[in-house]
Amino acid sequence: MTTRLIVWRHGNTDWNAAGRVQGQTDVPLNDLGRRQAAEAATLLAALAPDAIVASDLRRASDTAAALAALTGQQVGYDERLRERFFGVWQGLTTAEVAEQRPDEYARWKAGNDVVGGDVETLDDLGKRVADGFQDAARLGSLVVVATHGAAARQGIGHLLGWPIEQVRTLRALQNCHWVELTQDGSRGWQLAAYNVGVFTDRPVPPPV
């Protein structure tokens, strides 16, 4: 039997829009993010998922709730699906990190582990998120997991057994876009689709 796992990034937040490092800060969705979640949920509900699991941070759990509202399911929560912990970077814009902590920023931009700043290592991130993916996948033949950008990419890479250099070839997931992974007994985990979505990060229209 083939298992399908949909790894879904949360919708937009004000910190996303400002280029501010969120990490494990519990930032809610903004109006655009809520609309993105509702649009994506319509497509994902048509897949008839067996289960929905989410990071317990609000931007991911509220994204998952948009899907659960259409399917009538309960959302399961897993702290292992939280975003990477970015330590002292959290709350700063990336421009501020580059100015205030240039050596750490240079390592991050190069795809290497950040030395200093209490930032979670890529290996620790990949292991914990992949463990969450594995447990979620046991809940049915098609499971949707709502998580975060860096967490999704590193968790997927760890699940597939990719080295960090190969993980870096995956571009960042857009808000409320998703990845499809499949697993069967003979081939293990495989990447079936990446950065899937039908909308762009367009601005919120003015009230009428």
Image (spheres, rainbow, N blue to C red):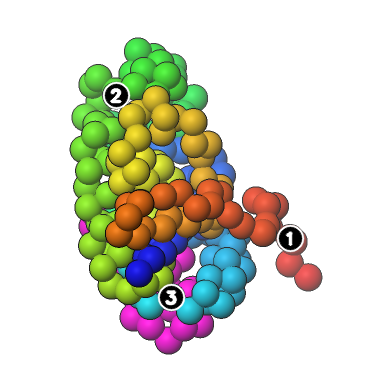
Q: Amino acid at mark 3?
A: Pro
Mark 3 highlights which residue? Answer: 49
Q: Residue at x 67, y 59 (%)?
A: 198
Magenta residues span 63-80
Instruction: Please provide percent x and percent y for residue 8.
Output: 46, 58
Distance from Cα at disc 2 to Cα at disc 3: 35 Å
| Mark toward the start of the polypeptide (2 vs 3) | 3
Instruction: Please provide percent x and percent y for residue 202.
Output: 70, 52
Relative to the observer, which residue lies in front, 87 or 135? Answer: 135
Mark 2 highlights which residue? Answer: 113
Numbered disc in front, either 2 or 3: 3
Which quarter shows the C terminus? bottom right
Query: Would residue 70 be counted in the magenta stretch?
Result: yes
Mark 1 highlights which residue? Answer: 205
Taking the image as shown, residue 125 lies to the left or right of residue 8, namely left
Distance from Cα at disc 1 to Cα at disc 3: 31 Å
